[in-house]
Image (cartoon, rainbow, N blue to C red):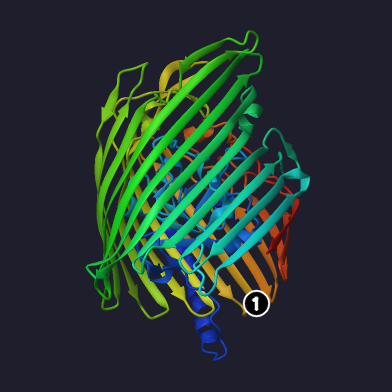
Amino acid sequence: MIANLSFKNKKYLDPFFCFRMLLFCSSLLFLAADLVAQNKNTSILIDSVVITTLRTNDEAFIIPFSVSSVGAAHFNKVNARTTPELLAAVNGLFIQKTNHGGGSPSIRGVTGNQTLVLVDGIRLNNSIFRYGPNQYINTVDPFSIQNIEVIKGTGSVQYGTDAIGGIINIQSKKPAFATDKSTATGNALARYVSGDMEKTMRLSGTHSSKKSAFQGGISLRNFGDVIGGATTKGQSPSGYKEVAFDGKAIFDISTKINLQLAHQQVVQYNVPIYHKVVLENFALNKTDQQQRFFEYAKLVILGNKNLLKQVDIIFSHQHGTEKRSSLKNGSNTLVQEQDKITTAGFSVNALSQIKKNYSINTGVEYYHDWVKSKRANVNTFTGSLEARRGLYPSNSRYSNFSLYHLHNITVSKFVINGGVRLNSFAIIVKDTFAEQVKITPSAVVVNAAVLYPITNRHKLYANYSTGFRAPNIDDLGTLGIVDFRYEIPTNNLAPEKSVNYEVGYKYKSSSTKIDLAVYYLQLSDIITRNKIPNEFINGYAVYKKQNAESAYIKGFEAEVQQAINKYFKVAAAVSYTYGKNNSRQEPLRRIPPFNGRVITSYAKNNFFVNAEYFFADKQDRLAQGDIDDNRITKTGTASWHVVNIFAGYQYSFLQLNMGLQNITDTDYRTHGSGINAVGRSFLVSAAVSF
């Protein structure tokens, strides 16, 4: 019934009406669960989840924010192809895919550089992250991931700029020390998806002693063209290749000092931009190479007194390269572009335990970006080369400095969380085709949250958060074709600002878990591309960034997990988002449709089976920018329903998994995507431990 709603009745557009209905239904569920819990034979079936991204190590159940977590166990069961596809399991998060090699998460209708991505607490976002959907989270190898935490609606106080929609913190696998003698283990995995849509090999190993431990692996992946549903079938060109390596080592230098060293690198080759070739008259449009190198050293020092209980010091280095090629049909001009960005980071976080129920985090963070960009027009007849200005001004610099102070206190029954961050920037855009631009924006953001336990199982919470996104080099210096527009530089932008209000309810017993949330997000000084009337370059309309708009987003989320018995569990979730652009008096761009999922799982002994049902309603509330976007039809994106089933068996050292995806062969695409999703397909994987 829910899956077929088209929202013709306007009262269903009111999130507060929907929230009341869900609260009523959930009330019946947890009252029934209370009766079940009274049975003396009831086991603890719902796991506790500890969240670390908010710079505290607290159970999600007692955190006064909306938080979600998805771990390696889920990835191993459903065999998600990429990190973005793994995130599809998180309620309130919607995945847009411009191409097969991408995947941009939208948290409550906010995506791109307005959503902050971290890897082990270190910023993945940099100063050339684009406005709107981007592909960068797909440069994290899913085989390197231990867990992903998603914090919705807050994050600027904890981690600074870009966290308007929230935070996605990807936590990589960490080796453990040996408790007795040194040990070494290995694992080899192979996976295949029908139609040659995926061929993957992964080799990994660990070595542990009492004072040191190492974990590492290499992934080799070959993705074929995506075969869509019943009417689409082959989508060429869309396949690409990928090589990834990750390693992490930990050392106990003393009883109070721990050192962690980590390295990750991902290289993707020949990633086609499918919709450009199909819809925009390109003979060739692809990312020739996209690579990310990432390493850090983290020193954890335990203090002697509660006033300085622990200090974490992190030095990080990241380097990214993106090479692109494009050639129009009938043209002899091959455009070759290359962007390089290097980021150096440093942070110190000090934890003070004032009292048993009162902790303070104080810290400083600094990140500095160097940008290199170039372009060449190559004549395919003569081979001559003409150097041109790149997408970004070369030798541009971006400095990000901040101080923060966070409090977490329990008073009587109340859990109170609050903090403040001061952030300043120095941005220098050295453009040889325009005047040099130097701006020094700054921001002060605060948050306050409180959780009240009605009983040990029932919790109510409310929070208030301000957020911001400082203009970056992509905003100030872009010159060239972006999506379906031609963008030119600007020289004066201020930070985007946000205010988020949220109220929610959490319930947890031994067999039931419920999360409900209603939110309202105000956005102001939005940096957006504005069309310059009657100006065109190479057939594309010309746009320029400005702080030109204000908007709001409101919505609700509901999620229920129920353990029927110790073998069988059911989880169901729905998410609704409504956005309006106040400046244009139209819908806000890229708002996902009403969507949800039902996941059932059965596990006994060494066998498991998971069945999934995902759905999304149609999205026909379109902004003018959506209508202009050739990835979206003029009538919007159609509704869809997809069923998947996965099963696996562990026999001694051998793990066998199988899956049937999109059983009904539904032909669909997620809203705003440039390529249709996978149709009916079969996957098989085998992993050997040694």
Residue 444: x, y in percent? 23, 47
As shown in the figure, which amino acid type bears the numbered disc 1? Answer: Tyr
Quadrant (top left, top right, bottom left, bottom right) of the C terminus: bottom right
Outermost residue on the bottom side: it is: 40
Q: Which residue is mark 1?
A: 567
Residue at the image position 35 percent from the left and 44 percent from the top: 345
Q: Residues within 10 Å of mark 1 (few under 14, many from 20)?
A: few
Whether residue 603 sits left or right of residue 374 in the image: it is right
Report the front residue among 563 and 606.
Answer: 606
Give the structural element (helix, strand or loop) at label 1: loop
In the rendered image, the vertical position of residue 32 relative to residue 67, given as above or below: below
Residue 542: x, y in percent? 44, 21
Quadrant (top left, top right, bottom left, bottom right) of the N terminus: bottom right
Report the front residue among 249 and 117.
Answer: 249
Residue at the image position 33 percent from the left and 67 percent from the top: 256
Outermost residue on the top side: it is: 382
Whether residue 599 sits left or right of residue 255 in the image: it is right
Q: Quadrant of residue 232?
A: top right
Residue 321: x, y in percent? 50, 33
In the rendered image, the vertical position of residue 132 relative to residue 153, given as above or below: above
In the rendered image, the vertical position of residue 148 relative to residue 460, given as above or below: above
Q: Quadrant of residue 448?
A: bottom left
Residue at the image position 37 percent from the left and 41 percent from the top: 344
Residue 10: x, y in percent? 49, 52
Residue 612 seen: yes
